[in-house]
Image (cartoon, rainbow, N blue to C red):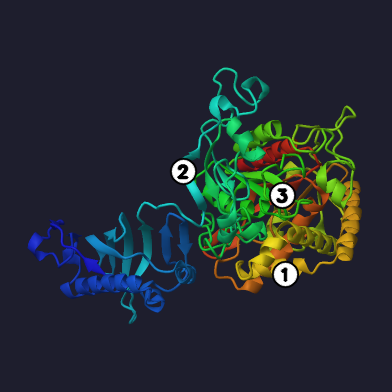
Amino acid sequence: MAERGLPAEAGAGAPVEALPAGVTSLDGAGILSSVALDEVLAAFRGYEAALMANDLDALDRWFAPGPATLRGDASGLLVGHDRISAFRSLRGGVPPRTIVELHLRVLDPASVLVVSVSAFAKGGTGLQTQLWRRSPDAAGWTIAAAHVTGAAPAVNGAVWRVVGAPLLPPHPMGTNDATSAHERPFVSARSSEGVLAGLSVAVKDLYEVAGFAVGAGVPAFLAEATLAAADADAVAALRAAGASVQGIAQTDEFAYSIAGRNVHYGTPPNPAVPGAIPGGSSSGPAAAVALGQAAIGLSTDTGGSIRVPASYQGLWGLRTTHGSVSARGLLPLAPSFDTIGWITRSPQTLRAASAATFAGAPGPTPVGGGGPGDGVAADVVGGGAQGSTADGGQPGAGAPSALEPRYVVSADLVSSCDDDVQAAFGALVAHPVFGQVESVDLGDLDDVFAGFRTVQGAEAWRSHGEWVAAHPGVLGADIAERFDIASRITAAEETDARARLAEARARFDAVLAGRILLLPSASSPAPALDAPPEVIGAARAATLRMTAVAGTGGYPAVSAPLMRVPAPGGSAPVGLCFVGARGADLALLDLAAGVAEVLAGE
C-alpha cells in the first residue's frame, strides 16, 4: 500500500503537528494511548498490504471472527466471517490503489472508525469505511464491519456484453420500420409514445439486435457470427412500444444451464444474495434488472431460465405460453421448449412488456391457445385442451381470459425442494388468499424429467452440435459434458421420449383442468458461489424436475417473489410459481399480482 501525504486537518483537540504520518484527520485522540493508535494504524496498513497482495490467509485474520462481522458494497451485504471469506476467495484481488486520505474517529478505547479515500492506478477513486475493534485476546485489532465504495464501475463484463446509454433508442414515433403507429394498439395516440416509453431493456445475448452479432455466451461463437440486419421480433416489439435497448446482456453458454456462471465472462452478481450464484441462463438480464441498470430483461426460458434467476434474485418473471411470441431472430436451444419472456422488478412493468410484445410480435400459436395445434410444443410433444373461455371460445395467447382463481399443488413436485423451501411454501399456500387449495397427482414426474432431458438434449445437439464438434475445448466443462451426452442420444431414444412427453402433456391437461398449479420456482435459494459442483448439480436436477412440468405442457408460468427462507447471515428469496392454462398469460400474471398485493397489505 502507498500513502500520499495531503494537508492534514486537525480534529477536536488534536493539533496538526500531532497527527501521525499519513493521517488526514483525527478526532478523539485523547481516548487512545499513542501506542494503541500506532497499533490501529499498523493494522490498517497491514490489511491494505494484504489486499494488494491478495493474501487470503492474512485477510481472513484481519477480519473479526464470528457470525456478526459485516462487509457491504454495491452488490449487497455479507454477514459473518465465513461468508466474507468465501466471497474474497472468489473475487480475484483488488486493483492497485493508493490511499490519498485517511480519517480516524476514536469511539472508545477499543473501537476506531477508519475512513479512507483511495485512488486507483487505472483511474477513479474509492471510499472505504471500517470499524476496527480491539479484541481482548491476542488477535489485537480486527475489522468488525466494513463498507466499500469502489471506483465508478466501467461496464461489468459479467453482466453486459455490450452496453450503451442507450445502445439503441426506441423506434421513431413508437413504431418499427414495418408498422405504422395506427397499427400498434400499444402506442399512445396522444403522445406517439409507447407504453414502455422511458424504460430500458437488457437483451439476452440470444436475440438479434440490429447492427450487432449474437454471441450466445461463447466468445468463439461471437467471433464467427455475422451482424444482424434487423432486430428480432421480440426486440422490435419492445422498441416499437417505446422502450430503448440498454445493451446486450450475458447468458450461460448457449443457454444450456440454470446456474448463471460463464467461464469466459464471469458470474454476474446476485444483489439479493451477495456471494451466491445469480441463476441462469438469463443471468445477465436478471442481474441488470436487479442492479437497476435496466427495467426489463428480455429473456428466454427452456427449462427454467427465467423462473430460476427471478427466484434467486427476488424478481418477477414470465415464461410465456409456448409459441405465443414470434421466435424470429432468436438463436434456439431446444425449439420444442424454448419460450420468450421477461424479468422485471415489478408486476406492472412485466405486464406492460408482455402485453406490448403479444400485440407486436405474435407467434405461431393459434388464437385458441389450446388443443393439438397450439404451437410447436403441441406438434412435438403432444396436444391438450386447456384454456377455454366462458363464451365457448378460447383465449388468444397472452390475452386476458376467464381464468378462475382455483389453485392446486402437487406434493410430489414440492418434495424436490429443500426443507426450508417446503416449509415456506406450505405456510404460504395455507393463506386464505388462495382459498381451498387441492392436491393433485401429476403422475411419474421422474419419467417426465427424463423424457424432457432427452428431447431437450437431442434438439440442443441439432441446434449446435456441428459447431460444438468443430470447436473442441471451447466450452466450459459442465456445458461441454451436456453436449457430449446430447450427442449420444439415439433416434429411438428421442422418439420414445417424445411419446412419453405427449402422454404426460395430455395427463397434465386433464388433471389441472384449467386450474392454477402452485409450486416453488426453484428447489432452493441461490447456492453459494463457492458451493461444490455436486451441490450445484443437485440443485439443478431438483429444480429441473419441477420446471419440466410447464415445459412439457407448453404452459405459461409466472415467478413472483413471495417467499423468503433462512440463509447464512439472514434470509434469501424464493419465487412462488403460478402455472396456468395455455394462452392465459396476462390473466395468470394479473392473478399473481393480486395475490402479491394482498400479501403485501398485511
Q: Residues within 10 Å of mark 3 (few under 14, many from 20)?
A: many
Between circles 3 and 1, the one closer to the viewer is 1
- For label 1, the residue is 484
Relative horizontal placement of residue 436, taking residue 188 as reference (left or right): right
Residue at 62 percent across and 61 percent down: it is 259
- For label 2, the residue is 164
Look at the numbered disc 2 and give the secondary structure of its residue: strand
Between circles 2 and 3, the one closer to the viewer is 2
Residue 231 location (% of width, % of height): 61, 39
Relative horizontal placement of residue 29, taking residue 577 as reference (left or right): left
Which amino acid type is marked by label 1?
Answer: Asp
Which amino acid type is marked by label 2?
Answer: Gly
CB-based contact (under 8 Å), mark 3 and mark 1: no
Would you say residue 49 is visible in this rendering? yes
Residue 64 location (% of width, % of height): 39, 72
State the separation of the CA atoms marked 2 and 1: 37 Å
Q: Which mark is residue 577?
A: 3
Residue 10 location (% of width, % of height): 13, 57
Q: Could you tell me which quadrant the N terminus lies in?
A: bottom left
Identify the residue at the far bottom of this view.
138
